[in-house]
Amino acid sequence: MQIGIVGLPYCGKSTLFQTITKTHLDPTALAKTEAHHAVVKVPDARLDKLAALFNPRNTVHATIEFVDVVGLKKGETGSTQFTTNFLSNVKTNDALVHVVRLFQNETVPHPDGSIDAVRDVTTFETEFILSDLALLETRVERIKKQLQKQNDDLLKRELPLLDKCKMALEKETPLREIEFTKDELHTLKTYQLLTIKPMLIALNFDESQRGEVDRVIQRIAQTKKGKHTSVVSFFGKIELEMSELAEDEMTMFMEEYGIKESALTTLIREAYALLGLQSFFTVGEDECRAWTIKKGMNAQEAAGAIHSDFFAKFIRSEVVHYDHFIEAGGSFAKVKESGHWRLEGKEYIVQDGDITSIRHS
Ligand SMILES: Nc1nc2c(ncn2[C@@H]2O[C@H](COP(=O)(O)OP(=O)(O)O)[C@@H](O)[C@H]2O)c(=O)[nH]1
Ligand SMILES: [Mg+2]
């Protein structure tokens, strides 16, 4: 999974990127025009606990790739230009984090001259909506031309779907907030539309603005929140300092500044929720591992996430929930006695925190 960090120049994208990926970008790297990529381990206290119990040779966390998407330029007229290069960098991401600047900093002026979070959120939304509309219109034209040459039922069926999208966008509704069937989503996937991506609005405050956070979050949420859009906050500058500390120092630092959880934990939790993702575990002396799948996947599909052979040759899944396993003192013998250990068929819907072992032929 890939999450793109986007935002106007000097809003704190690279600051956030360095914080969550624990990388250090020097001034030459920061000035580069290519996107920065880094893969981070998804923090999971449950996996840590399982690893402590099994003491396996390998502990494998789920991973997410973060991209610091660059390429937004200040145009000659003063307004920000959403270049083709920028838009195509955004297309490949599964979800977007839109960093919106709330901090004041005289040395790096806001490109639009003032701090206004609602305006910045709207600027992005409008650009993405226009980009999607242009793409859909081109596609509709092409299909119509194709249909003049030859009848194609598949193409014909695509037109109402494209109309449905266009109508939503013309009402300024991003596509992520529109209901689509599984088939429709499948068709739309190939277009790499921008407004269909889950969106996390991340408000970047200075620590001195702590008192304003709740009020601003509420204001943005009132106008922008939807099922697939959420709003979070972070303190860019001090969280970058914090990410460079050792773990025990970090806990003290967080208490001192009243930070409840790190930006990484917040972003990953919200991204999982927006994307409808969850984790299950496989355990053993060899390896303890967290796997990420879509909510609602059945046991056979989850087995397929581990290995395509497991999907094809799936027989049954042995399942126990993490909570029950820990309650039973981390012992399979005890958990079997408790009745919480089950054998499930392929239709079983996997739950977040399941520990499973796949039986296959
Ligand atoms: N005062 C303050 N400055 C910040 C904060 N976050 C970022 N900055 C500064 O703003 C400038 C631009 O940040 P950067 O992350 O490079 O922005 P980008 O252009 O979006 O990648 C840097 O000089 C940062 O130190 C913050 O929360 N408070
Ligand atoms: Mg940057």
Image: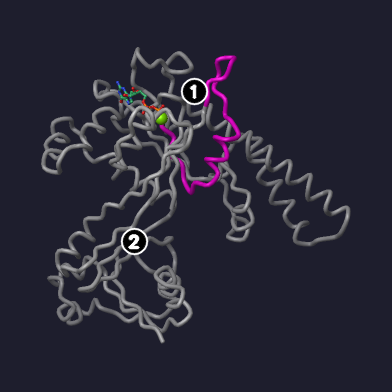
The percent position of residue 276, horizontal first and vertical second, equals 43, 55
Which numbered marker is on residue 119?
Answer: 1
Circle 2 Cα neighbour tier, 10 Å, few/some/many (<14 / 14–19 / ≥20): many
Q: Which residues are magenta?
A: 73-99
Q: Which quarter of the rendering shows the C terminus?
A: bottom left
Q: Is residue 35 left or right of residue 191?
A: left
Which residue appears at 68% of the width and 41% of the height?
135
Q: Is residue 314 left or right of residue 75?
A: left
Residue 112 shows up from this direction: yes
The percent position of residue 346, horizontal first and vertical second, equals 43, 78
> Residue lying furthest bottom in this view?
361
Relative to 45, say whether 77 is above or below: above
Which numbered marker is on residue 196?
Answer: none
Which residue appears at 84% of the width and 54% of the height?
147
Circle 1 Cα neighbour tier, 10 Å, few/some/many (<14 / 14–19 / ≥20): few
Relative to 158, say whether 333 is above or below: below
Q: Quadrant of ligand 2?
A: top left
Which kind of residue does numbered mark 1 sit on?
Arg
Disc 2 target residue: 279
Relative to 69, say whether 285 is above or below: below
Which kind of residue does numbered mark 2 sit on?
Ser
Relative to 351, say whether 254 is above or below: above
Q: Tags 1 and 2 in contact by the CB under 8 Å rule?
A: no
Which sits in the foreground, 31 or 106?
31
Which residue appears at 15% of the width and 75% of the height?
331
Which residue appears at 46% of the width and 13% of the height?
113
Assess whether residue 131 is covered by the magenta stretch: no
Circle 1 sits in a helix, a strand or a loop, which is it? helix
The percent position of residue 282, horizontal first and vertical second, equals 29, 70
Circle 2 sits in a helix, a strand or a loop, which is it? strand
> Residue lying furthest right in this view?
149
Q: Earlier in the sequence, mark 1 or mark 2?
A: 1
